[in-house]
Image (spheres, rainbow, N blue to C red):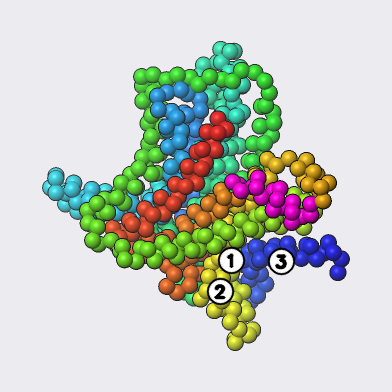
Amino acid sequence: MPAHRLRDLPLLILAVLLVLPVLAVLGSWLSWNAQSAQILREMAATVLPDYALTSLLLCASVAVGVAVVGSAGAAAVTLFEFRGRRLLEWALLLPLAMPAYVVAYAYTDFLQFSGPLQTWLRAQFGLQGRVFPEVRNTAGAAWVFIFTLYPYVYLLVRTALSERAAQLMEAARLLGAPLHERIRRVALPLARPAMAAGIALALMETLADFGVASYFGIQTFSAGIYKAWLAMDNRIAAAQLATVLLAVVAALLALEARAQSRLRFVAGRSRGGGMEAQPVPLKGLRLLAAWAVCALPVLMGFVLPVLFMLRPLAADWSVLPWDRFLQWAGNSLRLGALSAALAVMLALALAFRLRRGGGGVARGVVQLAGLGYAVPGAVLVVGLLLPVGWVQQAWPQSAVGYWMTATILGIVWAYLVRFVSVALQSVQSGYARIPASLDDSARMLGAGSAALLTRVHWPLLKRSAAAAGLLVFVDVMKELPATLVLRPFDSDTLAVVAYQLARDERLGEAALPSLALVLVGLIPVVLLSRTLRGKG
């Protein structure tokens, strides 16, 4: 075998491992038979319309909500100057630290019939029955997603307005255009591609969610996949639903890629000299409106949920599961640290090979790795367990099922498929700051590939690698759908325990692991805030 083929062999093996879950889901249609057709007809006549309608309504509500909330906040902190702007500019990122299912638990605990708010209102005003409508429905889920996912739109629109609209906004002002015309005819058209990309990202997160949909009892595709697999024990139905969800996510990926390409086009067209537009100072009612636009999302998406979860902690510490908390935290830390280390090593290997001119194979593997983050956890579970079932049917004595479900192999594999792309983006951004002349100098001094990586690149990549590891670690800590199914026995993580306690209506006990996840989630928010301020 030629030497270059041998060098490509590890990359090809990695590509197979990363793409196997998706191939397994698509390959399930190759075993199409009368039973598969009957199952599909039954789903089309019963649950599939509900899944499609609920998912459509949820996605439409979330799309409108994140577009309005995220764009309004971005415009306020970018185009205007007012007291507290810098604080709110950072605070608008805080909901990124909140897993959506944690926010759902917090609001339910506070607003439900037996919650403190309705109990106080009934006692104070002599009311009877339910004071507020049930929060666990599609509208409640949309509320949760809007105020936890709007930062995707906020970040992209803020970047578009601050980097691309400045000169044109100033030119429009000098031509006499009033403020509302400058926003409507200059800022909004320039921010539209960023808005579309942010909406696509938010909708991918919405469709991939399992925790909120399951807890609120709404019929989405992710919840349906788990119900088909675990409740009905029907792998064919689960695979068919996973395929539908995968097709929708692929369409959203195409929309996001198209929006990003338009964003780059706008960026190239708007660079140039000229005076930057100065933010418009606000006073009076306009100042109050800006405060409301920026503070309301932070209040709804971060401050109130945290206060709601702190309430049971302050009320009675004795009911909290302190004795097992350390075990749950240890399981989460162990899985997070192992997955982060492996993801960073794979990312370094891929980025280094690409840096050295890896050719089409390396570029293809990098593209496959980048797609993994968009694959919903429910699809990953089906895609990893389907081949296990096929192998066990062919070789009943095989231990594949044991290794995939009774050890950490299966769950770490799922984490790597999803989160290698997170590490890869951070490492590649670090490589972009290393001039190619350093590689040429090292080669002229006789350094081989190993010496180039360890003695030249690694010292310059330490910060990027550390950031990559932290991001993967936090994502693993918060991951719920794949962990819920693939975790080994007696290896519950903080995310799984929070979900199980909330499902059992033990919301006060769920506050402790939920708050721990929020504290961990603050790490990337702080890193992101420092990065954005460094660019500003």
Amino acid type at circle 1 is Trp
Quadrant of the image containing the N terminus: bottom right
For label 3, the residue is 13
Left or right, residue 444 beside residue 499: right
- Pointer 1: what residue? 413
Image coords of residue 328 (percent x, y): 40, 64
Q: Position of residue 242 (x, y in %)?
A: 56, 64
List x then y, in percent, for residue 161: 56, 29
Please determine whether, in this image, residue 451 is positioned above or below residue 65: below
In the picture provided, is 209 more to the left or to the right than 2? left
Asked whether 303 or 133 is in front, the reply is 303
Q: Is residue 302 above or below residue 372?
A: above
What's the magenta bit mostly, secondary-structure-wise? helix
**Residue segment shown in magenta:** 447-464
- How far from the left and from the top, in percent, is residue 427? 64, 49
Give the structural element (helix, strand or loop) at label 3: helix
Between 263 and 60, the one nearer to me in the picture: 263
Residue beneath the point at 76% across and 65% down: 9
Q: Where's the C terminus, which quadrant? A: top right
Comes first in the chain, label 2 or label 3: 3
**Picture residue at 58% right of the left edge, 18% below the top:** 170
List the single residue furthest toward the front.
Answer: 445
